[in-house]
Image (cartoon, grey):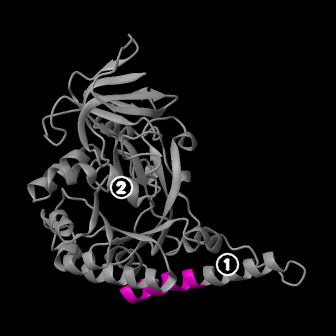
Amino acid sequence: MLIYNAEIYSMTEDMHFYGYVEIQNGKIIAVEQGKPEFVTSQDINANGGQLLPGFIDAHTHLGIIENGIDFEGDDCNEISDPFTPQLRAIDGINPYDRCFEEARKQGITSVMVSPGSANACGGEMLLMKTYGRCVDEMAIKACGMKFALGENPKSTYSNRDEMPVTRMATVALIREGLQKAKLYSERLQRFEEHPDEEEPPEYDAKCEALLPLLQGNMKAHFHCHRADDICTAVRICKEFGLEFVIVHGTEAHVSADLFGEWGLSMIIGPVICDRCKPEMKHLELSNASILYQNGVKIAICTDHPEVPIQYLPLSASLAVKGGLPREVALKALTSEPADMLGVADRIGRIAVGLDADFVLFADDPLNIMNDPVWVMINGKMI
């Protein structure tokens, strides 16, 4: 099947050109400039519209906090224990939540769904498509472990007179958990190398869940609003040799030059919100722009349901209003989150071998008045 007569924003080096895309079995098999030699009735005429990779929201709680439901549909935070790496978002997501449809209608074809930030470690995150009836079939991969610093763990457990009540205690819990997992990993390795001489460690679900992180097969996602919390996340990750990404980064602009020098990646958002707690007092619309200008890699998220997921394109538009270049904003919805999440071989660009996830706009996708003409996921018109 061909999609032709399109203004293609591929998010590759040849970012913007007129051409066509060929799809087979849900994958892109050709991306070409100009016009195809012939078309059939099965092919799709883009009518000169703007064809982009499906948008990616790199940080949400979609389906794990269900729309319009209180406690019964909220499976985001397991606050019986402040350190829960053994939890998996995939076990708490309801794919029938109507907000998946609202995401699709605005061109969002993939989302990272995260356990919440009440805990120092909330659990394993899931990157998934927004179309399907079974989470297992929608899943792309588990590619993040959620950690949280700052006010959320403090406020959750201080009301219960339990640790952590301070930032120090939150970090101590994380460090303790990672160190235990490190020792657990070393014992496993010794047993595997010398099974006749060594005993395997007693099974520990928390340590097992952290092994992919310590082995470099998964990134740590650190919920941080304040600049000092970002520095703390960097300190922890350096100590344990972790690949990581900062989530939210609300006041990162106050130290943007430092974070750019460090080569940080940040998932910025929510953009559309108030300064609802002390650590967000430096919220600025120019945050993404300042970070980009200082060399920080950025993606834009909604943190759904903090901001309803259908406002992801609007969030990018407001970042442009705050000074972010338009093409950078489009990359912050596509290629940049794909790179940060380690799935650039699947999604985020229009390139041969990638999933056929597209959104077509008749005009500027960052204009609030424009909705997608159509959305495609895995080569299927949704």
Does residue 107 appear left or right of residue 127 in this picture?
left
Does residue 183 appear left or right of residue 132 in this picture?
right
The label shown at residue 145 is none
Tell me, yes or no, if residue 113 can be seen here: yes
What amino acid is at disc 2?
Pro
The label shown at residue 185 is 1
What amino acid is at disc 1?
Ser
Which type of secondary structure does the marked residue at label 2 adopt? helix
Question: Is residue 364 magenta-colored?
Answer: no
Question: Who is closer to the viewer here, 9 or 249?
Answer: 9
Question: Is residue 176 magenta-colored?
Answer: yes
Query: Furthest-top residue in view?
Result: 41
Q: How far, Cα to Cα, is label 2 from label 1?
A: 30 Å
Q: Please state the extent of the stretch shown in magenta in the rendering.
A: 163-179
Kindly identify the residue that appears in the image at 26 percent across and 60 percent down: 269
Kindly identify the residue that appears in the image at 14 percent across and 55 percent down: 325
Kindly identify the residue that appears in the image at 40 percent across and 49 percent down: 111
Question: Who is closer to the viewer here, 181 or 331?
Answer: 331
Note whether 158 is above or below 103 in the view shown. below
Q: Earlier in the sequence, mark 2 or mark 1?
A: 1
Q: Residues within 10 Å of mark 1 (few under 14, many from 20)?
A: some
Residue 230 location, x and y as percent? 32, 78
Note whether 340 is above or below 93 in the view shown. below
The label shown at residue 337 is 2
| Image quadrant in which you'd find residue 30 | top left
Residue 32 location, x and y as percent? 34, 32
Secondary structure that dominates the magenta span: helix
Tell me, yes or no, if residue 60 can be seen here: no
> In which quadrant is the N terminus drawn?
top left
Question: Who is closer to the viewer here, 118 or 212?
Answer: 212
Note whether 145 is above or below 106 in the view shown. below
Residue 118 location, x and y as percent? 41, 70
